[in-house]
Structure formats: structure tokens, C-alpha cells
Amino acid sequence: MQDSPAASTPYEVLGVSPTATDDELRRAYRLLLRQTHPDVGGSAPKFHVVQLAWERIGSPENRAAYDRRRFDVPEPTATTDAYAAPSTRGPATKSSLKTRMHGHPGGQARLRYLDLVREWAGRGTVIDDPYAPALIRSAPKLVRHCLAKALAEEATALLVANLGIGFTAWHDIDTGGQSDKLDHIILGPAGLFGLLSEDWGGPVQLRRGELAGDDLPEGERPIHRFDDAARSLTRGLKVRFTALIVVLPDGALDEPVSLPKRGRRPMIIVIPRSCLVGVLRDGLGGMERGSFEKVFELRSTLQNGIRFVNS
């Protein structure tokens, strides 16, 4: 979780500016150690977070290395722009047959990040590199979350791309109503799945049917919004999802969790990214796999009916 743009930076943990002097950094660290130490009534998890922050920027060498480090953002080339996904086709081999991919994973989130970072920097400010480490880390969390979400969607797409020719994927889908977009739709032998790829930069838990965590914005209801978006799409296309899947970075979730089905609504599961391929290939326990004919028919329906955001 430390590598997420949405995660609290060591500077934020220690409560200092990225331009703080080494002496200011050291004083802030020592003060927080005294305040968070369990022996004086502090919190053991917070004490640990403070120590980790100090390990990352406590020495001049470590601090310089941290400040130089870039997030996993593709560089512009002649064929991709600054907000294009890294290759969603995976490593090329002569024998490999890849998933049919449609749409632009992470595209809307990257565009929003670029808009917000320029708005935050101020009108008339020239930004030479919107992915410069210092710029990203100094931006507000809302701005950083947009980049983290784009990277999360791209990471999901990279996994999906190598599922094989029996699968088809659509990314950044317009739901046709007031609801949010759907990040991904995956069709394969195990069924039809709607996916939400997210990264809030910290751990989350399932509480009363909704995701919660210290790093989620107040009032955020991601599962509710995801369910609404999926229902908008299914009403428009007259299809039914086998399940809805929330995909989180490994480390954000202690173990996979699920919400029971309600009436005709699909099951919703929340899983770490490392579990995704297994679920998409093998389905869920007790779930009946679809026939080839049904998959082919669904693919035609989706291909003819799906529209993409920003298209």
C-alpha cells in the first residue's frame, strides 16, 4: 500500500512539509514517537506507521531516493499519450492468444487527474511533467486518488488481457444514466462479471454492507454506487451479471469478503487483485458455468450495446 499515490506520504504522517529541513523532520518524528508510543497510551498501529515513515525519509539518502521515485506511470511515446494504459495485451508471444479488449482502462480517471492537478496548481501555471514525484506527493488526496484509481484500473486490465481468447473485456463503460461508469465488464466461460477497480491508499473493511476505512472520503459509498451503475447497465442491455467484483490492491483487505444476493441482484464480492484471475477463470463456488452458445450470444449483445465514456 505504500506505493499507492493515494497513500499518506511520510511527510503527511510526520506532519511536515516536503520542504522541511532535516532538523524539522527529526523534531516531528521524536514528538510523534512520544505521542503514539503504546507505553504512554498511544496507538501501536500509529506508532508503527510513524516508524515506517521515518525509515523512508529519516536519512538524507533515503529521503533523496524517496523524493526521486516515480509511480508506475507510462511515459508518452509516439503511439501512447501520457494517460494511456501500459500495454493491455501483455507480453507478446507467437503462440499466445489474448483476451479481446475494448475501451480505454483508466482513461477517464487519468483525464480527471490531469484536469484536477492543473486546477490545483493554479491558472497560468505551467506544469512540465504532471507525473513528477514531487508534484504528485504535494497534491491533495482527492487529486492523488484519481491517479491511484487510474493505475488500479490499468493493473486489472493487464491481468485480464492474459486470460485468453475465450474472454472478452470492455473498459470504461458508460452506464447510460446518472450512475457512475463501470470500470470493466468481463465475459468468459465462468459468466459475466462487472468489476470496480479501486485504491484508496490504505486498508478497508466491510461494515454493514459497505466498504469503510480511514482513507475513504467521508460519506463515500463505493459498493452502493457500483451496484447502482451495474443495475443501470443491465436494465439498458437486458443482461444479468453473474457477480459484481470489487478489486483492491493486495494488502488493502485481510481476506476476500462477499455480500449475499438480494432477490435477483448478483452477488457482490471484494477481493485482492491477486485473486482476480482465479475468480474470472473458475467462477464462484456452486455457480453454474455458462454454455459456449450463451457466451457467444452475450458477447454479441454487449458488443452491439456497450458505449464508452469520453468516446
Image (cartoon, grey):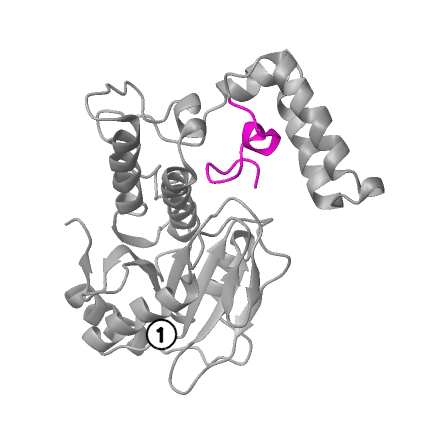
Q: Is residue 232 magenta?
A: no
The quarter of the rendered structure image containing the N terminus is top right
Q: According to the image, label 1 marks what residue? A: 241
Look at 31% across and 38% down and name the residue there.
113
Which sits in the foreground, 160 or 311? 311
Characterize the local packing of mark 1: few (<14), some (14-19) or many (20 or more) Cα atoms within 10 angstroms: some
- Residue 152: horizontal and vertical position, in percent? 42, 46
Q: Amino acid at mark 1?
A: Phe
- Residue 248: horizontal and vertical position, in percent? 50, 53
Taking 150 as reference, is 6 left or right? right
Q: Magenta segment, principal secondary structure? A: loop
Which sits in the foreground, 108 or 195? 108
Taking 189 as reference, is 108 left or right? left
Look at 19% across and 21% down and name the residue there.
124
Taking 183 as reference, is 55 left or right? right
- Residue 188: horizontal and vertical position, in percent? 37, 66
Look at 35% across and 65% down and name the residue there.
225
Q: Is residue 5 magenta?
A: yes
Above or below residue 251? Residue 269 is below
- Residue 284: horizontal and vertical position, in percent? 52, 73
Span of residues in magenta = 1-17
Residue 20 seen in this snapshot: yes
Look at 36% across and 65% down and name the residue there.
226
Which sits in the foreground, 193 or 297? 193
Above or below residue 231? Residue 215 is above
Location of residue 220 by image quarter: bottom left
Element class at badge 1? loop
Taking 227 as reference, is 232 left or right? left
Above or below residue 79? Residue 166 is below
Location of residue 122 by image quarter: top left
Residue 188 seen in this snapshot: no
Which sits in the foreground, 183 or 211? 211
